[in-house]
Amino acid sequence: MMGANLLTDIKGNYKTVIIVVTAGDAANGAAPMAPGYTADIATSFNTGTTPYYRARLNARLNALATWIPASYPRPWQITTEAFGPYFGGVPTYVEKATLGNVIEYHINLPDQFEGNQYTTIENLNNTSGATGDYYAYDVTGKNVYNIHSLREIVRQIIKRNFPSEPNLVINYQEPAWRNASYQPVPRMDPSATDHIDHTAVGKMVKDAIAGVPAYYCMTEAIYYGYVQAANLPSPNFPNAINDQRLGYEALHQTLSTQGNIIPFHPGDAVSGGTWGTTQVYSPTITGQQRQRGAMDAFHTSFYGKQIWYGIPSTGPCNLGVNG
């Protein structure tokens, strides 16, 4: 829900570092399609050989590239960066994508509910014990995290990229579930149509900052979720709408090309499960309808809308020395 501010920073040529915590694999792991799905439902998943999560990551990089100043040479440079060792006795190699003034890290933790009906990120947050008694592998099986190593890697990413920058702003999701009146409600309460991993990642980031007080030097921009943005009577950042739409067009084009989704057809509406059978799909600039997750009415309804509150900095940062 921080799209308008992110867009402003990227197009303004400010150095922007993005940390994508979950892989967006929708419980597919590293597979192209979830096992056991019938053919009619499988149109929601990748029918090709590119893993579902990888197609989604490729799509978001192509969307971001539409905002990055054209003066920077394409394409994205994909590398890995080593951290630690913090947990398991071996370094953690985090994927890193760089293009111009933007760096995006992909931690790639699973996007799934586990046996206790909490997501992987929630279970990491809910761990107990001084060393963390819960751990999770990323979708590739290459890296393993507990909550303490995850928080430390987030802090190290900030420190390494901004060791001497005095004025930093960290953006993250409001960790508490809230209704349209901004009042706290229980987890997954139907009055707060939020994404469960968004709130869980918000809590992880908030706790990472609290774990080392030197990071309170950063101004914190904390974003409310879907229900609050949807409740805005009209876009409060109308100048962002066209750029957001162009970004989503690039996202959809990538997903279509890599077999992740196909253009919407009427029979596919019933395969949405939690989306129901009445979901309205939004036409794109070209008039072609789009399948959920790219240009559907739910996601496009947030164009130009965002709402957040701030926690002020405690003073200039010098994380290379104090972090």
Image (cartoon, grey):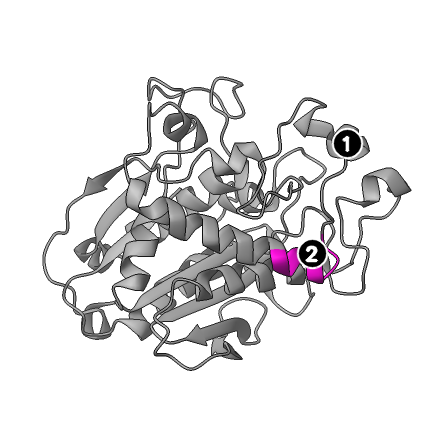
Residue 68 horizontal/vertical position (percent): 37, 67
Work out whether residue 89 or residue 65 is closer to the camera in this orientation and state it. 65
Work out whether residue 153 or residue 32 is closer to the camera in this orientation and state it. 32
Say few, some or many: other residues with alpha carbon within 10 Å of mark 2 (under 14 / 14 to 19 / 20 or more): some
Residue 246 horizontal/vertical position (percent): 47, 54
- Please say if 176 is above or below 38: above
Mark 2 / mark 1, whichever is N-terminal: 2
Residue 22 horizontal/vertical position (percent): 56, 53
Quadrant in the picture for residue 202: top left
Quadrant in the picture for residue 298: top right
Can the viewer see residue 130 in this picture?
no
State the residue position of label 2. 256
Span of residues in magenta = 253-260
State the residue position of label 1. 266
**Residue located at (44% from left, 60% from top):** 19
**Residue located at (53% from left, 59% from top):** 60
Say few, some or many: other residues with alpha carbon within 10 Å of mark 1 (under 14 / 14 to 19 / 20 or more): few
